[in-house]
Image: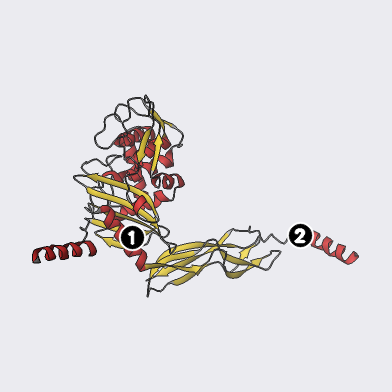
Amino acid sequence: MKRILFLLSFLCFFLYNEVALADPAAAAVIDAKTGRLLYAFNENEELPMASTTKVMTALIAIENCDPEAAVTAGDNAYGVPGTSIYLEKGETLTMRDMLLGLMLASGNDAAVAIAEHVGGSVEGFCDMMNARANQLGCVHTHYVTPHGLPAADHYTSALDLCVIAREAMRNPLFRQIVSTQRTTIPWQGHAYDRVLNNKNRLLSTYPGAIGVKTGYTKAAGRCLVFAAEGEKGITLIGSVLNCPDWFDYSASLLDRVFAEYSLYTALNAGEIVNRIPVRNGIYDSVELIAEEALSAPLTEGETAELSFRWPQSIPAGIGKGEQIGAASLIVNGKTLCSVPLVAAEAVPERNFRFGLDTAADHWLIWSK
């Protein structure tokens, strides 16, 4: 009887107490709007990334190719090891469908077909990938393949992966593709279409999840780039590399960061910031307004400073919405984000024609 009670007690403890999750080799979470680093663990360590490589593959393809362009699978795309959408030699799909096969089913064959179509060769395409990574400031990233199968000198860091995903998620087509849970694309030579199911389980299990990509090889372990929109108006982008509990750990990271940060709004879109003099204009001054909201995630107790930049005066001839200055949000001495300050209205120049028109208007009023 005592043995049974002990087993029941152990079972209850197991069911009602959180099981510890295995730590990843590296992890990072950033704010999608500002890029602010909100969580970091070995964030700059250079590690293999498996199929999270395909975030950059898709970004390069979208930036350099019409989504309706015809992409034909060559000899090199046929029979690539690992996950596949089973392209036949000479099979043609639109770039959009290739990207769906790449990002949902993680097709390595689709990655090669895309690379050869856009870059002329896998090597040429990887040069494009590396150039784009450098442009984004990702100094801990280097690409050798477009799919992420094990290769020497092919690596990234958790933070770089977040930065790359943040750039990609700004693209509407990329965002649409990686948030798709299930779809079909044509299958040449078959009476039915290919069915593609997204491997990112967070899309169906985590509220607000919107992407982005899974990856796994024995060398890299389980890797995941993820993104989610929170109830406080914050969108997070994160990554874990070599993480045994990739989905559960990523969900716990999202919960933690969403709980720790709230959105602080320093300026609302359209808010009047200042009025500055206009030289030789039909008006003597013009209002400066924030073109968009100036906001960033802050923890409780953090304070933010506002910094403004505008000229002492401006010449006439400005148009409505023309940028005149900028407002920045500063936390701990670091600028998190900036927004343009624009003219609330147009201010034409006070010239001879304006004088004649004004005089004519006054004469008409007087004559009545």
Q: Which residue is painted at 40% across and 34% down in the image?
A: 185
Q: Which residue is painted at 36% across and 46% down in the image?
A: 132
- Which residue does the numbered mark 1 point to in the structure image? 254
Amino acid type indicated by mark 1: Leu
* Tag 2 secondary structure: helix
Asked if residue 49 is positioned above or below residue 114 in the image, the reply reads below
Left or right of 210, for residue 247: left
137 or 28, nearer to the observer = 28
Amino acid type indicated by mark 2: Phe
Asked if residue 100 is positioned above or below residue 269 in the image, the reply reads above
Q: Can residue 2 be seen in this view?
A: yes
- Discs 1, 2 touching: Cβ within 8 Å: no
Dot label at residue 354: 2
Q: Where is residue 89, by image quadrant? A: top left
Q: Which residue is painted at 23% across and 47% down in the image?
A: 48
Q: Residue furthest bottom?
A: 301
In space, the residues marked 1 and 2 are separated at their CA atoms by 59 Å
Residue 78 image position (x, y, % from top left): 29, 29
Count of all numbered marks drawn on residues in the image: 2
Q: In which quarter of the image is the N terminus?
A: bottom left
195 or 351, nearer to the observer = 195
Left or right of 71, for residue 161: left
Q: Is residue 18 visible?
A: no
Q: Which residue lies furthest to the front in this view?
A: 1
23 or 293, nearer to the observer = 23
- Judging from the image, the colouring scheme is secondary structure
Residue 357 image position (x, y, % from top left): 80, 59
Residue 86 image position (x, y, % from top left): 31, 31
